[in-house]
Amino acid sequence: MRRSMLAMALVAGTIMLGLVAEAGIAADFSPTIEFTLGDNKANTNSTFRTVVKQDAGEEELASVELRVPAGFSLATDQQLTNGERLGGGTIVIAAGACPAAAAPGTVPVNIIERDRSAGEIASGVQAVYVVDLEPVTTIDLKVTGSAQEGWTLAGNIPSNPATCPPFTFDATFEQRAADSQTPILVNPTLGGTYKFSALFKGVGGSEVNLEQNVEIQGAGGGGGGGGETITGDDNTAKKKKKCKKIKKKKKRKRCLRRLRG
């Protein structure tokens, strides 16, 4: 009887050790992101660079949400021409027999505009920015929100069995769209500290939320780290107040109209 109980205990212990070992080698999930404006001055049409990185062995990305704070203006579908280029860059990613025999390869990135479908319009999508990384994958970033509320650029990332981390994605939205010459991103009219963020989800269910403060230089906050944090309703109220102080009627109306998006 004792031998039987001892054998059962050894088996149970072996199973538990196996489970612990398996849990210990679970894939890490720690993507990083860096936002950079080409020009931090208030009310300026700036380039917008995004660098995303993952290390080898990490859980692969399933989706991403980029959040641009209230005050910034983004180009919407009605202002853009279907298929026009908005920016580009590169992705350096492991490719081949993933992960053991993968080797780094460089793939060009093109960001283009796509007209919204009827369903996307009905669901409140303001624009679709297509991030073309072929032959790796293609991501439709669906843009929702407004300059008053802030923006979300959300997209699912189709998997590709021939690619895996590590990777470095480095792409920039240009100042203006290639064909229509529409400004793609315009900084807030008031200086201050603005919080950008990103939510990454992994194929295994992991989630990471990252935040980064960006300083805008100009009246209102001064930028350079000394400005106030301006978000949501506070920012909208201050911008309305500034518009109403404009003496010329046409300019005042134009300012308020732009504020409404």
Image: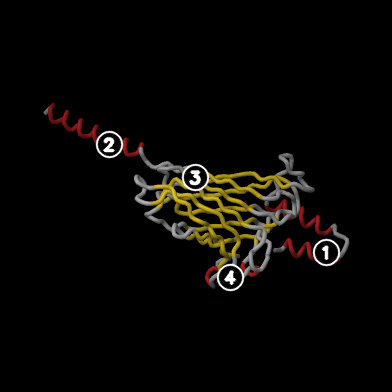
For the residue pair 238 and 18, the one nearer the viewer reads as 18
Q: What element carries label 2?
A: helix
For mark 1, give the secondary structure. helix
Kindly check if marks 4 and 1 are in contact, taking CB atoms under 8 A apart as contact. Answer: no
Q: Earlier in the sequence, mark 1 or mark 2?
A: 2
Name the residue beneath numbered marker 4: 82
Q: Which amino acid does label 3 sit on?
A: Pro
Neighbour class for label 4 at 10 Å: few (<14), some, many (≥20)?
A: some
Q: Earlier in the sequence, mark 3 or mark 2?
A: 2
**Residues at marks 4 and 2, CA–CA distance in whole angstroms:** 54 Å
Q: Residue furthest top?
A: 2
Tell me the amino acid under the disc marked 2.
Gly
Front tag of 3 and 4: 4
Q: Residues within 10 Å of mark 1 (few under 14, many from 20)?
A: few
**Nearer mark to the viewer, of 4 and 1:** 4
Residue pointed to by mark 3: 31
In terms of sequence position, does the residue under pointer 1 or pointer 3 come before the other? Answer: 3
Query: Which of the two marks, 1 or 3, is nearer to us in this view?
Result: 3
Dot 2 corresponds to which residue? 18
Amino acid under label 1? Lys
Q: In this view, does 116 lie to the left or right of 190?
A: left
Label 4 with label 2: CB-CB less than 8 Å: no
Element type at marker 4? Answer: loop
The one of 24 and 102 positioned closer to us in this rendering: 102
Q: Which of these two is toward me, 30 or 175?
A: 175
Q: Distance between the residues labelled 1 and 2?
A: 71 Å
| Residue bearing mark 1 | 251
What's the residue at 72%, 63% (across, down)?
A: 260
